[in-house]
Image (spheres, helix red, strand yellow):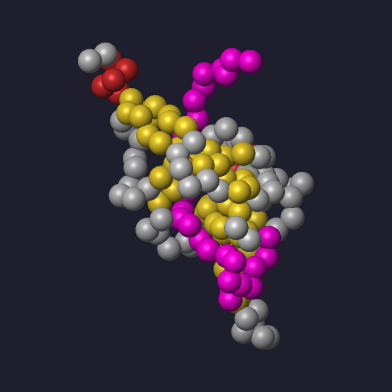
Amino acid sequence: MTLEDKFFVPRPVLGEVAAGNPLTIYPDAIDTVELPTVARMPKDSFLLRVKGDSLKDAYIFSGDIVIVNPNLEPKNGQIVVAIFDDAAVVKRFYKKKNESSSVTKIELLSENPDYKPIIIEKNYLKFKIVGVVVGIYRSMEKKAG
């Protein structure tokens, strides 16, 4: 057993999630990353690779791996992964209630002024929160090519 085997464990990356325009999701693992053994992986959590720059001001960049916990109920201000019109996005979550009409809306906000918020009516059928982002992993290795 090498030192690397003691400190890193392979984990599957289940797909890509858009930090920008929504991306199609994949049913199978698309890659594997070597996560440090100290990386916290809550029960049932999974990994997704970020694609896009809409969360750059939250220091989440294209190519980063997000650790998603599907067992948490999102709170305002948390970063979530959601399915919107059959595509996956990663955005900052806010639930807002319109006082005059008592209609609840969900806003998914970018952390980049180049992107507009996604606003969803509470009863929109093609929307689902998949989980809350609880961690980020970024490799500092330079990719070949």
Where is residue 138 shown, x and y percent of the image? 50, 30
Q: Which residue appears farthest toward the front when viewing the image?
A: 27
Residue found 28% across the figure and 20% down from its top: 5
Q: Is residue 143 left or right of residue 139?
A: right
User: Residues in magenta?
Assistant: 118-145
62, above or below 86, in the image = above
- Relative side of 139 to 103, left or right: left
Which percent across, then down, holds residue 24?
61, 48
Residue 65 vs residue 136, the one in the foreground: 65
From the viewer's perspective, is 39 left or right of 61? left
State the residue lying farthest toward the left: 1
Task: Give the total number of marks visible in the rendering.
Answer: 0
Observer-nearest of 116 and 13:
13
Q: Residue at (52%, 22%) from the top-left corner?
A: 140
Q: Position of residue 61 (x, y in %)?
A: 60, 36
**Magenta run includes residue 130:** yes
Residue 89 in view in this figure: no
**Picture coordinates of residue 26, whole percent (x, y):** 52, 46
Vertical position of residue 138 compared to residue 14: above or below: above
Q: Nearer the viewer, residue 69 or 25?
A: 25
- Residue occupying the point 43% across, 29% down: 33
Place residue 99 in its image quadrant.
bottom right
Q: Is 132 within the magenta? A: yes
User: Can you say which quadrant of the picture contains the N terminus?
Assistant: top left
Vertical placement of residue 85 versus 17, above or below: below
Q: Identify the residue at image location x=66%, y=40%.
A: 52
Res 69 seen here: yes
| Quarter the C terminus occupies | top right
